[in-house]
Amino acid sequence: MTRNHSRIQKICQILKTQYPDVKTQLNHGNAFQLLVATILSAQCTDRQVNSVTPALFARLKTPEDFARTPIETIETLIRSTGFFHNKARNIQNCARTLMERHGGKVPDTIDELVQLPGVGRKTANVVLGAVFGIPGMVVDTHVARISKRLGLTDGADAVKIEMDLIKIVPEKDWNDFSLWLIYFGRSVCTARKPGCPDCFLHHLCPYPDKQA
């Protein structure tokens, strides 16, 4: 791995210049809506989630609504996001846990968030950063892929990658760094055919399989 301090600084500065105004692409009006939307985003595009949530949140507005609504109704409303049986069950159980343990409010600590059904560290960090402004390193498929290509981690799982990244990226940049890599992964460093010839990080990237 190539993770020296000056190189990380350069990567962060270039990414910040390229993507100066980043935010989660999941549409939401409050912490609970973002929590639900992030659960729905598993193995689904943000665009598809955003096409589903307006009708979903018009029908079901609060944790109590989700907790009391027949599971079949939730499944119907989220069907097009895929894996809708599991997602509906997780969302409903998450809503019930919020009602039982947190008075219907989304907690603002990662330890409490990951205790909610269907909520892992990725989802928790999305909510903490976007809603509460608490630094967190979100590791999705883009972040995992690109951080490996850049030699910032050799981790095989999301938690290991997260721990590697928070050791080298300044805490003030954790939230933005995840989003920078997500934006970068969608537009340049794509999974199957990365745009290496036009990449603004080309000179800092040790990836051995660069595209000509």
Image (cartoon, helix red, strand yellow):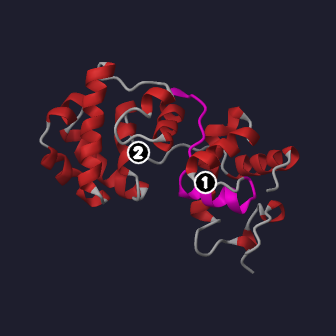
Picture quadrant of residue 199: bottom right
Q: Which residue is mark 1?
A: 143
The N terminus: image quadrant: bottom right
Please name whichever residue, 199 or 160, is drawn nearer the observer in this view of the structure.
160
- Is residue 118 visible to the viewer in this orientation of the structure? yes
- Quadrant of residue 119 within the rendered picture: top left
Q: Amino acid at mark 1?
A: Val
| Residue 149 belongs to the span the image colors magenta | yes
State how far apart marks 1 and 2 are (Cα): 16 Å
**Residue 27 percent location from the top left of the image:** 40, 44
Q: Position of residue 123 (x, y in %)?
A: 46, 41
Q: How many marks?
A: 2
Q: Where the C terminus falls, by quadrant?
A: bottom right
Residue farthest to the bottom, as pictured: 212
Local SS, label 2? helix
Identified by mark 2, the residue type is Thr
Q: Viewed as shown, does residue 80 lie left or right of 30?
A: left
Whichever of labels 1 and 2 marks the residue nearer the N terminus, that label is: 2
Q: Which mark is residue 38?
A: 2
Q: Judge from the rendering whether residue 2 lies leftward or rightward of residue 194; answer left or right.
A: right
Left or right, residue 61 beside residue 16: left
Is residue 62 at least partly visible in the picture? Answer: no
The residues colored magenta run 132-152
| Residue lying at 45% horizontally and 41% vertically, measured from the top left | 120
The residue carrying pointer 2 sits among few (fewer than 14), some (14 to 19) or many (20 or more) residues within 10 Å by Cα, namely many
Measuring from the top left, give residue 29's x and y in whole percent. Answer: 37, 34
> Where's residue 32, x and y in %?
35, 33
Callout 1 secondary element: helix
Residue at 77% of width from left, 72% of height from top? 208
Residue 89: numbered disc? none
| Residue closest to the far top | 103
Which residue is at a point 51% across and 32% down the rendered structure image? 128
